[in-house]
Image (cartoon, rainbow, N blue to C red):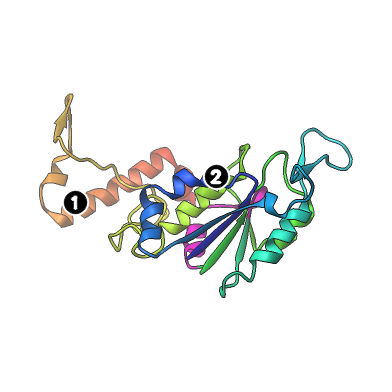
Amino acid sequence: MIVETVSTFPEIFDSYMSSSIMKRAQEKGFLDFHAYNLRDWSEGVHKKTDDKPYGGGCGQLMMCEPIFKAFDEIKDKFEEKPFVVFLAPTGKVFNDEEALKLSKKSRLTFVCGHYEGIDERAYSLADEIYNIGDYVLSSGELASMVVIDSAVRKIPGVLGAEDGAIDESFSNGLLEAPQYTRPAEFRGMKVPDVLMSGDHAKIAEWKDKMSKERTKKCRPDLLEK
């Protein structure tokens, strides 16, 4: 999968995309990542990408012109057609199902907002707009990294084990059952005996039961769905 980001602060991606799973995904050839600096398509000495909003209001708004210029130049950089993603409060709620859909795309291009927001006309480029939660971030880069990570780990082979992403929370609509590792007892807290029994049928039954109980307790809204 090719993943591209267009933003005013591309260096934000450096650390995360060169670490852990994202790094291994690139080394194994599952991910080809490119971070573009929007200022490369801005004019003037200061390479401005933002301006005051029409009609007044606080803060600065990202201009649409540099975004369109960037897209015009990079859209044909690869043979694969880009699937363009924006992050905004008006977008569709991002969840595990949407992550799976994105993981099947051959090329994802993220346009990252900053400052007070983005000129509304830029959203005409979007194939999908996502909302990752009812809160505000200063950086669209952070929101994009959440979506990128969630989608890339769904690509078969990225996590190593074939079923690595299948058994995670939300993959079946429920929260994952509690998990434990060594030591078997720590400060009076013991690992459930069934997990050390070696009986795979009983372990599967226990995990299913605990998954439903945990979901009912912590996220009853998931059961309603």
Position of 34 with respect to 212 (left or right) is right
Q: Secondary structure at mark 1?
A: helix
Query: Looking at the image, can residue 132 be seen?
Result: no
Residue ID at (77%, 49%)? 63
Query: Does residue 166 lie above or below 77 as drawn?
Result: above
Query: Does residue 206 lie above or below 100 as drawn?
Result: above
Q: Residue 64 location in percent, x, y?
A: 77, 53
In the rendered image, residue 95 lying in the magenta stretch gets the answer yes
Amino acid at dot 1: Ile
Residue ID at (68%, 53%)? 40
Label 2 CA crowd tier, 10 Å (few <14, some 14–19, many 20+): few
Q: Earlier in the sequence, mark 2 or mark 1?
A: 2
Viewer-side residue, 221 vs 50:
50
Query: Which circle marks residue 63 in the picture?
Result: none
Query: Which circle marks residue 11 in the picture?
Result: 2
Amino acid at dot 2: Glu
The region drawn magenta spans 86-104
Query: Does residue 89 lie above or below 187 as drawn?
Result: below
* Displayed quadrant of residue 108: bottom right
Q: Outermost residue, right direction?
A: 55
* Displayed quadrant of residue 9: top right
Q: Residue 117 location in percent, x, y?
A: 72, 43
Q: Outermost residue, front direction?
A: 45
In the rendered image, residue 127 lying in the magenta stretch gets the answer no
Tag 2–tag 1 contact (CB < 8 Å): no
Position of 111 with respect to 209 (left or right) is right
Q: Secondary structure at mark 2?
A: loop
Position of 130 with respect to 115 (left or right) is left
Residue bearing mark 1 = 203
Work out how far the residue at label 2 is from the one at label 1, CA to CA, in angstroms.
Answer: 45 Å
